[in-house]
Image: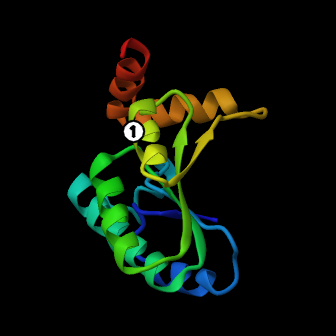
């Protein structure tokens, strides 16, 4: 399950799913077709993302935090101090390898994801279009 931090009202969905699904992936993502029901300002998306993470850390048992945003990673690390669910950080392969190594070195579980299947190219293009910062993260990861 991927919850959308951009969505205005995903909280009830997260609460319902924490009791039914064994692995939750939270990803900060929105597509063009959801522009009527989604936050557009990064600050609001981040605030919503943190509130959803709090629900998962308080009520979830196994879930993933899918982000390359170091501020969100720090929030997750803080939340994990007060709660002990089984969780992992989930990131795209080749992006923020430095952060992945740091987290793994601290004992966190980290998964690398690779877009695949018939829509891998369209997915990758869409992700780059939606968030220009992803291009810079990719370039920084490649150039070191």
Residue topped by disc 1: 99
Q: Where does the N terminus fall, quadrant-wise?
A: bottom right
Q: Does residue 10 appear anywhere in the picture?
A: no
Q: Where does the C terminus fall, quadrant-wise?
A: top left
The reply, left or right, for residue 38 in relation to residue 91 is: left
The reply, left or right, for residue 27 in relation to residue 133 is: right
Q: Position of residue 135 (x, y in %)?
A: 38, 25
Judge whether 124 appears above or below 140 on screen: below
Judge whether 96 appears above or below 36 on screen: above
Q: Position of residue 74 (x, y in %)?
A: 30, 57
Dot 1: few (<14), some (14–19), or many (≥20) neighbours within 10 Å? some
Judge whether 91 appears above or below 10 on screen: above
Q: Residue at x 48, y 77 (%)?
A: 84
Picture quarter containing residue 87?
Answer: bottom right
- How many dots with numbers? 1
Q: Position of residue 39 (x, y in %)?
A: 32, 61
Q: Residue at x 21, y 58 (%)?
A: 43
């Amino acid at each position: 399950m991927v919850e959308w931090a951009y969505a205005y009202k995903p909280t009830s969905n997260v609460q319902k799913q924490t009791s039914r699904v064994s692995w939750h992936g939270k990803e900060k993502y929105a597509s063009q077709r959801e522009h009527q029901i989604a936050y557009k300002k990064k600050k609001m998306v981040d605030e919503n993302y943190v509130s959803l993470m709090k629900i998962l850390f308080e009520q979830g048992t196994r879930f993933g935090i899918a982000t390359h945003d170091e501020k969100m990673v720090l929030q997750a690390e803080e939340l994990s101090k007060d709660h002990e669910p089984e969780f992992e950080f989930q990131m795209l392969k080749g992006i923020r390898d430095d952060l992945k190594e740091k987290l793994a070195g601290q004992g966190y579980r980290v998964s690398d994801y690779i877009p695949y299947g018939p829509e891998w190219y369209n997915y990758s293009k869409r992700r780059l279009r939606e968030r220009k910062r992803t291009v810079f993260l990719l370039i920084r990861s490649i150039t070191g």
